[in-house]
Image: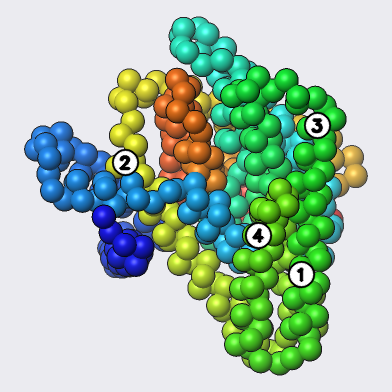
Amino acid sequence: MLTLFQLSAALLTLTAIFAWLNERFLSLPANIGLLLMGLGSSLVLIAIEVLFPNTPVYNVLTNALQQIDFYEAVMHGMLAFLLFAGALHVDLGRLRSRAAAVGLLATGGVVISMFIVATGLWLAARGLNLPIGFAWCLVFGTLIAPTDPVAVLSTIRAVKVPESLETDISGESLFNDGVAVVLFTIALQAATAGGDDLGASTIARLLLLEAGGGAALGLVTGIVAYQAMRAIDDFSVEVMISLALVTATYAIADQLHMSGPISVVVAGVLIGNRGASHAMSDVTRRYVFGFWTLIDEMLNAVLFLLIGLEVLVLRFDPSFGWIALIVIPLVTAARFISVASAVTILSCWQRFVPGTISVLTWGGLRGGISVALALSLPDTEARPLILAGTYAVVLFTIIVQGLSLGRFVKRRGVSASTGNGG
């Protein structure tokens, strides 16, 4: 068994090698290139193991990957840093002007998509006589409904769209995962324990405590960090303060059963706007933002590589191939309906650029959060189906939608020059 240091060294070395190969020969977007090479390596090793059983390399790599708890690594490790890094670059003024759109997409949009996916999968399962009840279909709906902030933010940077649309896409992805995690917890409790005590008041209280409490916590800790930064001018100390802010805020949120993702996003927006303009010198701002950009790029690379390599451990049953044919169009349709509903409701008083619905639909990438939630499920009959469906959607959205989003935006005539919604 590898030590933590050895495992980290091996993972970082593999990430660096694949990143170099992608930069040198493939020239794909960095994260998508790493995911594809990780996935390709997994499939090659699986094929070698099938043809030549008990291959030493296969066994060593599989045992090493099995030491990694993907759920813990993402939800209680990388996610806090990645969300804070993304939130630092969100323009607060633009976010305020698009608050209604971001808020409705991140809440109502998730709920609509969740129920459409759950109902569609349940009907398909009944037609195929598969052992998955509506409660577990609802669990799948909650974990696959939200767009993934890591995947979305890393992709949208390379696509030029109007500022209002960029704010809608990035703002929704930063906030909807906090709401989705609460809904996932509720749905999982209902599926495993019957959910007898999950009345409307209980659900509302959980949402208020997790989402509202997380936002309030992030605001408080963000203000404390802002005041500390404002009192000094030393970039090394202020970088350290930002690190402490992320880790402490997320840890406190976990202890208080509040939304860690929402709390670090709120803190990140505050530091990235108020902190950058009033608490940092030009030198400090350059170092703080440079540090978090580097953290963002490195963790993104490791995460996307891990998503590809996880296939080596999971070894999906080939008979589950049919689920991809069901869930990919189902999730896409649900995304379209939820986005169209939100835009239609808000269009009376909120301006949207032409093509908003189609770009938000095709730009709704899923990623590490959905995979992490699926891997956290207990060992039931429904788990293999949900895992297979989750991986199918994640790989399709990142590889197919992510690689084609730039061309899709151009074909739709949506560019930074088409105007900005107010």
Image location of residue 70, percent across then percent down:
44, 48
Q: CA distance from mark 2 to mark 4?
A: 29 Å
Amino acid carrying label 2: it is Val
Q: Is residue 258 left or right of residue 293?
A: right
Residue occupying image coordinates x 80% and y 45%: 209
Task: Give the label, 2 or 3, closer to the camera.
Answer: 3
Of labels 4 and 1, earlier in sequence is: 1
Q: Which residue was labeled with disc 4? A: 250
The disc placed on residue 313 is 2
Task: Give the label, 1 or 3, closer to the camera.
Answer: 3
Residue occupying image coordinates x 43% and y 45%: 399
Decide which of 73, 111 is in the foreground and name it.
Answer: 73
Q: Secondary structure at mark 1?
A: helix
Q: CA distance from mark 3 to mark 4?
A: 24 Å
Q: Is residue 206 left or right of residue 348?
A: left
Amino acid carrying label 3: it is Thr
Q: Which residue was labeled with disc 1? A: 222
Location of residue 217 with respect to 384 vertically, above or below: below
